Amino acid sequence: MIFAASAPSVPTPSDWSSVISGVTGAFSSSNIVGVLASVVGAGVVFVFLWWGIRLAFRSIMGAVKNGTLSISSGRRKRR
């Protein structure tokens, strides 16, 4: 059996209208702003946790090495 190959049809703007209306109906600007705000908020929390964990680790290691406990950022000059 031989099948005749038909040429693919080119989508027209009316074909895309249902896709566009579905996407715009599913997402609103307030949803997008809410997602961006939560991502930025989670990023800020992650950065502060990272900074705090590093500071605590340095303080504990300094206490073990030197025998003193100091909670500082370690940016002061040593004499």
Image (cartoon, rainbow, N blue to C red):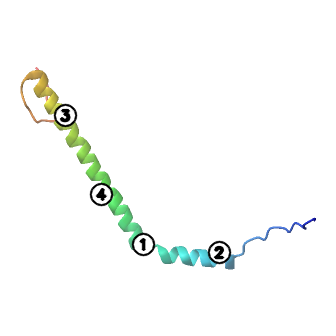
Q: Which residue is mark 4?
A: 41
Q: Is residue 22 visible?
A: yes
Query: Reading the chain from its start, which is encountered first: label 4 or label 2?
Result: 2
Q: Secondary structure at mark 2?
A: helix
Mark 3 neighbour density, 10 Å: few (under 14) some (14–19) many (20 or more)? few
Amino acid identity at mark 2: Trp
Q: Which residue is mark 1?
A: 29
Q: CA distance from mark 4 to mark 3?
A: 24 Å
Q: Is residue 75 visible?
A: no
Mark 1 neighbour density, 10 Å: few (under 14) some (14–19) many (20 or more)? few
Q: Which residue is mark 3?
A: 57
Task: Tell me the quadrant of the picture where the C terminus can be found.
Answer: top left
Query: Reading the chain from its start, which is encountered first: label 4 or label 3?
Result: 4
**Quadrant position of residue 62:** top left
- Residue 16 is marked as 2
**Quadrant position of residue 77:** top left
Q: Secondary structure at mark 4?
A: helix
Contact between marks 3 and 2 (CB within 8 A): the answer is no
Q: Secondary structure at mark 1?
A: helix
Contact between marks 4 and 2 (CB within 8 A): the answer is no
Task: Tell me the quadrant of the picture where the N terminus can be found.
Answer: bottom right
Q: In the figure, 49 relative to 9: above or below?
A: above
Amino acid identity at mark 4: Gly
Mark 4 vs mark 3, foreground winner is 3
Amino acid identity at mark 3: Phe
Mark 1 vs mark 3, foreground winner is 3
Q: CA distance from mark 1 to mark 3?
A: 42 Å
Residue at horizontal 38 percent and vertical 64 percent from the top: 35
Q: Position of residue 30 (x, y in %)?
A: 38, 73
Residue farthest front in this picture? 1
Amino acid identity at mark 1: Ser
